[in-house]
Amino acid sequence: MVANASEYLSDYLTIALPKGKLFEPSAKLLAEAGLAADNLSDSSRKLVITNERDKVRFIISKTADVPTYVEYGAADIGVIGKDVLMESGQDVYELLDLGFGRCHLMMAVPKDKKREKLSDYANTRVATKFPHIAEKFFARNGMQMEYIKLNGSIELGPIVGLSESIVDIVETGTTLRENNLEEIVPIMNATARLIANRVSFRLKFERIHKLMTDIEAILKKRH
Ligand code: PRP
């Protein structure tokens, strides 16, 4: 009997990896755990890379789309920052904190336009890639804001007068410094997480559980 497409794919473990900063450490960690593929790179134009021998497929996607591929089961598992995962609100299992990609989300303003206290920014415009997280944060502080969604280079917002402030990721602090912005208040810490589709986690439990155990052992050795 000829296997249909879903039977064929169920033999494979499909992993969504984000392009950019998390790609290299994710690919390295998975390779250490025995999941690798030739020519796995986020700079290639090839978006699906398969290792037929080990029955592993890698999907290379835009960072913000990783939780979507995993929620809908197009990928069984994936690696994504906690910040992007929370913003997406996608319904997936969060399996492990991978420890790398450490950064934090914060609110920042131009140094020369700093106001006295947080509530002084109420009803002003904030530029961000994370409007949902930002909205929850400001609501907790009893503040209504106007959110302007940007997709990158968020720091530009207040410099060109698009917004009074930003809510964005800080890793080294270089981008803030180079653009004369100052952090006003931290919002949340984030690291990379291993996530899984809820159905895949049950159907491919042995394989995913073994991967989790292997990764935990690798992370333990690293510390
Ligand atoms: C992120 C973030 C900041 C920068 C912070 O942007 O949005 O701009 O990194 O890093 P730093 O504190 O080490 O300077 P990213 O490089 O992911 O690109 P983007 O601006 O296109 O989102």
Image (tube, rainbow, N blue to C red):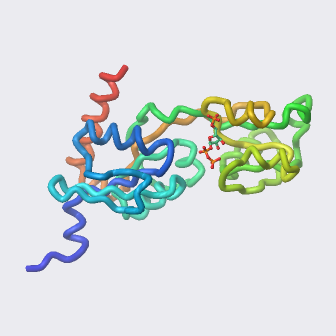
Above or below, 181 against 127 in this view is above
Q: Is residue 34 left or right of residue 106?
A: left
Task: Determine whether, in the image, residue 101 is placed left or right of residue 130.
Answer: left
Q: Is residue 79 above or below residue 49?
A: above
Which of the image's four quarters has the C terminus?
A: top left
Residue 139 picture location, percent across and down? 76, 45
- Residue 137 picture quarter: top right
Most distant residue in the bottom direction: 1
Give me the residue at 78% from left, 54% from top: 147
Q: Residue furthest top?
A: 223
**Residue appearing at x 53%, y 48% in the figure:** 85
Question: Residue 29, percent across and down?
Answer: 33, 37
Q: Residue at x 46, y 33 (%)?
A: 100
Image quadrant of ligand 1 equals: top right
Q: Where residue 94 sits: x, y (%)?
A: 42, 44
Q: Is residue 3 left or right of residue 89?
A: left
Q: How many marks?
A: 0
Residue 160 in picture, x, y percent from top left: 85, 50
Instruction: Look at the image and tell me in which quarter the N terminus lies.
Output: bottom left
Q: Quadrant of residue 60?
A: bottom left
Nearer to us in this view, 2 or 38: 38
Q: Residue at x 58, y 33 (%)?
A: 103
